[in-house]
Amino acid sequence: MNDDIRLRQDILDELEYEPSPDAANIGVIAEDGIVTLTDHVLSYSEKQAAVQSKG
């Protein structure tokens, strides 16, 4: 499996596991080992939870 695909899936799994951010509102892109979170969250605390989820 491609490392970027695995990395992206790991991030998505973490976002689903963590109850704070609404994972439906967060897009995940992984390219060359760099992860970018896109879209929006409803609060600063959801943003922080999403950032911390990426490991």
Image: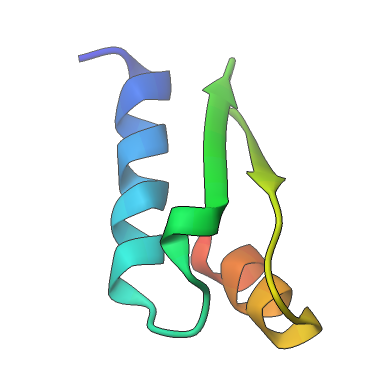
- Residue 55 visible? The answer is no
Residue 47: x and y, percent? Answer: 71, 71
Query: How is the rendered protein coloured?
Result: rainbow
Q: Is residue 38 visible?
A: yes
* Vertical position of residue 53 compared to residue 36: above or below: below
**Horizontally, is 54 left or right of 6 in the view?**
right
Question: Vertically, is 53 above or below 3?
Answer: below
Q: Residue 3: x, y in percent?
A: 36, 20
Q: 15 above or below 33?
A: below
**Furthest residue in direction left, as rendered:** 1
- For the N terminus, give its image quadrant: top left
Return the x and y of residue 11 as percentages of the image width and height. 41, 50
Asked where in the image residue 15 lies, by quadrant, the reply is: bottom left
Nearer to the camera, 14 or 33: 14
Q: Judge by depth and name the residue closer to the eye, 26 or 6.
A: 26
Quadrant of the rendered image containing residue 19 = bottom left
State the residue in front, 49 or 27.
27
Occupied quadrant, residue 45: bottom right
- 14 sits to left or right of 45: left
Q: Identify the residue shown where x is 42% and y is 21%.
A: 4
Q: Is residue 54 left or right of residue 43?
A: left
Vertical comparison of 54 with 4: above or below: below
Task: State the residue at coordinates (30%, 30%).
Answer: 6
Q: Residue at x 49, y 84 (%)?
A: 20
